Image (tube, coloured by chain):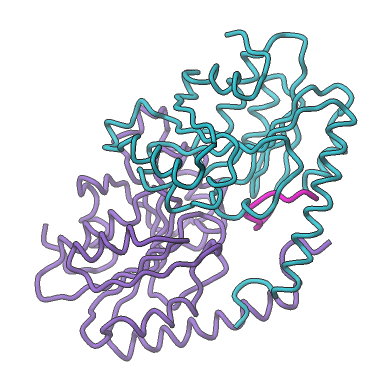
Chain colours: A purple, B cyan
Amino acid sequence: MHKTCDVEMEKNILEENERIAHENEHIFQENDIRAFNVLGAIGSGKTSIIERLYEGMDGGVTGGALAGDLTGEDDYQRFVDEGMKAVAVNTGKDCHLDAHDVNHALEDLPLKELDYLFIENVGNLICPVDFPLGTERDIVMISVTEGDDMVRKHPLIFAQADVGIINKVDLAEAMDVDLDVIKQDYRNVNPHGKLIKMNAKEGKGIDKLAEELELPYSL
Amino acid sequence: MHKTCDVEMEKNILEENERIAHENEHIFQENDIRAFNVLGAIGSGKTSIIERLYEGMDGGVTGGALAGDLTGEDDYQRFVDEGMKAVAVNTGKDCHLDAHDVNHALEDLPLKELDYLFIENVGNLICPVDFPLGTERDIVMISVTEGDDMVRKHPLIFAQADVGIINKVDLAEAMDVDLDVIKQDYRNVNPHGKLIKMNAKEGKGIDKLAEELELPYSL
């Protein structure tokens, strides 16, 4: 039985994705855009950290956002309301963005104007693993409200994260979640990755993320 | 560019899944087992509602649990600790269980003894949509901690749910989440589906779910 795709076909898809990811990287460099891939489960706070980061960035920079979702424009609209140059990518039934989605969406963004591009991937910790987009760094978020077993249940995505974020930390006690367990699990799969505790809704920890990403942040 | 699988191959996979799902259904009927597919994002509380349901069921019934996860045995162990007949299915990189996974796992369960089987699917609201398992009903959970836009962002899985559950409702106010928005979105995609508010950790609402599923529940 073919479990998902035929192995050869899957290999072709991944190679093609890799090729277009390099193309995207080249486009970002050409246009002096720093691009970030923001990953995490649904409701972990991906949209919020992008909003808060952008609010705190020095005037005079222009931020873009690519909102990846199965359907709808909720997050796209939030980015527009923040004054960002935004584009919505609806993947239908696909559980991740791929490099081709991003490549195509770049046609709808004013690349010459952009200094930064935040790509919000589709909400889950599984599918995006095999699909690099050509971004400078991968930021992977979890929320303490998901429990303390999320990292060890999804080791692949945390192993390749450049920055891990534990969001909604203020709720850890109420949720009976042990932050040290999450930290240790992350350390086990990703000994050198940065890990930042955060409460994105209130802006707590955003400054540390901005510093880690070397963004001009003044709040 | 092939976005995911070649269309013809995808069609074959889905037809094969459908065929094995019917086979599973037949196995459940033959053995007088009522089987349920429990779906939801990571951390939404799937393991907890199965635990609470089983704790409240009359003595003299035997419950089985199939724990679907990418990796690890966390949930499997929780079911064993509840005294259930459990089996772990690790899907590796696959973001859903398929009927074949279940069919294979049934070989490791004492089917003659079981009255009920709770299948905990892999945690996300996207991939399991196309893969019926042969169960009697699909139960789809969300947690208010994920925000109030989860249903409209994932309409397909909620459209085909027999029962929808909003979990962790006690946190709605703290999370600034409007339950009426979730209810209305659910009603829009699934006019006839049951929707139950719950706090699974404390057992609140479990009785309503048991009633809806016609389970012998005495707490």
The magenta segment: B91-100
Where is B66 relative to A152, above or below?
above
Left or right of A96? Residue B9 is right
> Is B99 one of the magenta-colored residues?
yes
Residue B173 point in image, percent of width and height: 27, 31
Residue B29 point in image, percent of width and height: 85, 31
Residue placed most toward the observer, A144 or A81? A81
Q: How many numbered marks appear? A: 0
Quadrant of the image for the N terminus of chain A?
A: bottom right
Seen at 63% across and 51% down, the residue is: B128
> Is A91 one of the magenta-colored residues?
no
Residue B94 point in image, percent of width and height: 66, 56
Quadrant of the image for the C terminus of chain A?
A: bottom left
Seen at 51% across and 47% down, the residue is: A151
Residue placed most toward the observer, A113 or A58? A113
Seen at 32% across and 32% down, the residue is: B172
